[in-house]
Image (cartoon, rainbow, N blue to C red):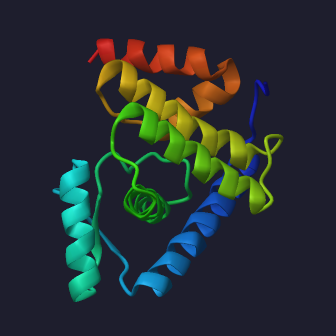
Amino acid sequence: MPENISSAELAIAQKNLSTYVTLEASHIASRVGFTWEPIADAPSTYKSLKSAYEASMRTKAPLPVSNENSSRVIFSSPEGNFAYRYLHDMGHVEMGLSFNPVDEFELARRLMCRLERAGYGPDTLEWKLYQADAIGQVIHYALTKRYVGDQLQFALDCIRHGLECGIFLEVERQRGN
């Protein structure tokens, strides 16, 4: 595991991930005919997500995605995170995967496979950031029923110290709050 990631390396990986998820989300939006809109009160259950999706399919209004915990993310901006949330939420509905931990893990793994097919394999910083965000947060939430607040710090901890230790460090941070 790399102990030190330079700010330049991190910035490039974040930009690449932002470009990747924005293009993926844009392809889906072109196919279904609606985009996404970040809001505070986005669907938080599978049932409410399916209802929002059906409404967007019917009206072509943007799908609401959560704008919470987006100030420090693995992407170069909160907008990249919003595109990822759209990609993720559309995956839930289109693949018929609920919000239970097993389905969340399956969705995260499928999203990881897509990233690999796009050319970002396990040896890249992009893949390691995405793994921490997609897989690490699923495991963290399954254990704690809490979301990660500082997603970038969480991802960097997972990369530097391994997934298990990164999750443990986040649990300890949350205990301190």
Q: Is residue 55 above or below residue 120?
A: below
Apparent side of residue 50 relative to residue 90 in the rendered image (left or right): left
Q: Quadrant of the N terminus?
A: top right
Q: Is residue 139 above or below residue 22?
A: above
Q: Single out the residue that lies furthest toward the right.
A: 123
Residue 120 picture location, percent across and down: 77, 54
Q: Residue at x 36, y 83 (%)?
A: 34
Residue 50 picture location, percent across and down: 25, 62
In the figure, residue 93 lies in which quadrant? bottom left
Residue 9 picture location, percent across and down: 76, 48
Q: Nearer the viewer, residue 46 or 79?
A: 46
Examine the rendering and report whether any part of residue 16 can be seen: yes
Q: Single out the residue that lies furthest toward the front.
A: 96
Apparent side of residue 124 relative to residue 164 in the rendered image (left or right): right
Q: Residue at x 61, y 23 (%)?
A: 163
Residue 35 picture location, percent across and down: 37, 79
Q: Is residue 25 above or below residue 50?
A: below
Apparent side of residue 29 relative to residue 3 in the rendered image (left or right): left
Apparent side of residue 42 relative to residue 101 in the rendered image (left or right): left
Examine the rendering and report whether any part of residue 61 can be seen: no
Q: Quadrant of the C terminus?
A: top left
Q: Residue at x 61, y 26 (%)?
A: 158
Q: Nearer the viewer, residue 63 or 154?
A: 63
